[in-house]
Image (cartoon, helix red, strand yellow):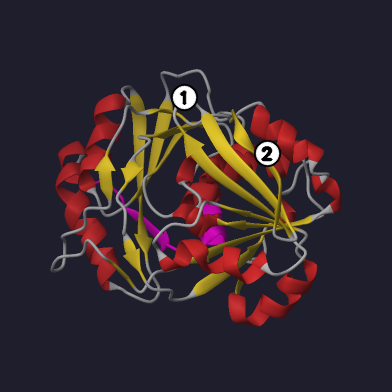
Amino acid sequence: MINEEYSFDDLKDFLLDTVDLLIVGWPNQEERSCFFYEKWYNTDTKILLVKREKNEKVYCKLLENKTTVFERNIDLCVGLSQLLNRLNINQKNVLIDLSSLDNVLIMFLTKQLLTRVAPKSLFASYIRPEKYSSQSGDVGFALSEQVSAIESVPGFTRRESDNQTLCTFLGFEGKRLKGILETIHGFEKLVPIVAFPSGTPQWYNVTMWNSMDILQSETKDLLVYKCYSESVFDAVRLLNETIAQDENVVLAPLGTRPHSMACAIFACQHQATRIIYDFVIESEHRAIGVSDITIYHLSSFIKC
């Protein structure tokens, strides 16, 4: 597996000339949520805005040359898949902006584009913020307003097994890990993975501090893995190295959006994999500023 991750500055001109369809979330007050939408708004590239709502519904808006072509509330599992089909994805070079989409949409769209409606080429982008606005001191992050019931992610539902491996990507909020461990019973092995930001190493310490008490309550000799928080490829590689092909796996992506995409990619390659999520309602004004921007070339993962 070649690590096809690049700086946006290095690929900016290529992407602006090549991308036919940009998939983004609805812009909000975070600067990074608007970045790619504003970059492509004045081009002739189609822009699909997607926002997840209650009861597995999504609100979609399709723009072409600044004109609204399609705007309505549709079903996530059926309606969004049908919309992607109607857009002739197989003839398009697609870019997904992870920073503006929520984790559930990232995972669902990843499966659709890798296994259902294969684009000509597939790219994704992720913007690391300059800082998180809820930070107070070294450990004070409050990035979620509410945590909902833990359920399978649409498109990644599997029958539970008695011999399960629970693999969880850890984020800043230790309470979310506690909820996962209280919900999933009967797992034989726990594989915790800590996100390691390349540009701000103190964030690694935050994740470990907030999760260590919970991890130690499971076992004193637990092996904790780490991978770069902005790397889709590093996370996929680690999952492939850590989890055997025939293992029954439950993935719980509680960390970064690139790691949620990595979980979806892995699950598309391993049929005995289920992905669960706590369907958090994220706080507004979570992040401030635009820092490093990473581009992922994902065409090698396309299966259909």
Residue 118 part of the magenta segment? no
Residue placed under numbered mark 2 in the picture = 112
Q: Position of residue 280 (x, y in %)?
A: 34, 39
- Residue 78 is left or right of residue 116, and the answer is left
Image quadrant holding the N terminus, namely bottom right
Mark 1 secondary-structure assignment:
loop
- Whether residue 220 is visible: no
> Which circle marks residue 304 in the picture?
none
Residue occupied by mark 1? 55
Tell me if residue 228 is in the magenta stretch: yes
Instruction: Give how far apart the Cα atoms at labels 2 and 1 are.
Output: 19 Å
Return the x and y of residue 117 as percentages of the image width and height. 77, 40
Give residue 192's position: percent from left, percent from top. Answer: 34, 47
What type is the residue that disc 2 sits on?
Answer: Gln
Circles 2 and 1, Cβ within 8 Å, touching? The answer is no
- What is the tally of numbered marks visible in this picture? 2
Is any atom of residue 28 visible in this view?
yes
- Residue type of the residue flagged with mark 1: Asn
Q: Residues within 10 Å of mark 1 (few under 14, many from 20)?
A: few
Task: Name the mark nearer the viewer: 2 or 1.
Answer: 1
- Please name whichever residue, 96 or 87, is drawn nearer the observer in this view of the structure: 87
Of residue 218 and residue 40, the one placed in the foreground of this image is 40
Boundaries of the magenta span: 221-236
Residue located at (42% from left, 61% from top)? 227
**Pick the front one: 221 or 232:** 232
Position above or below: 225 against 6: above
SS at badge 2 = helix
Q: Is residue 294 left or right of residue 227?
A: right
Residue at the image point whose x is 63% and y is 45% from the top: 61
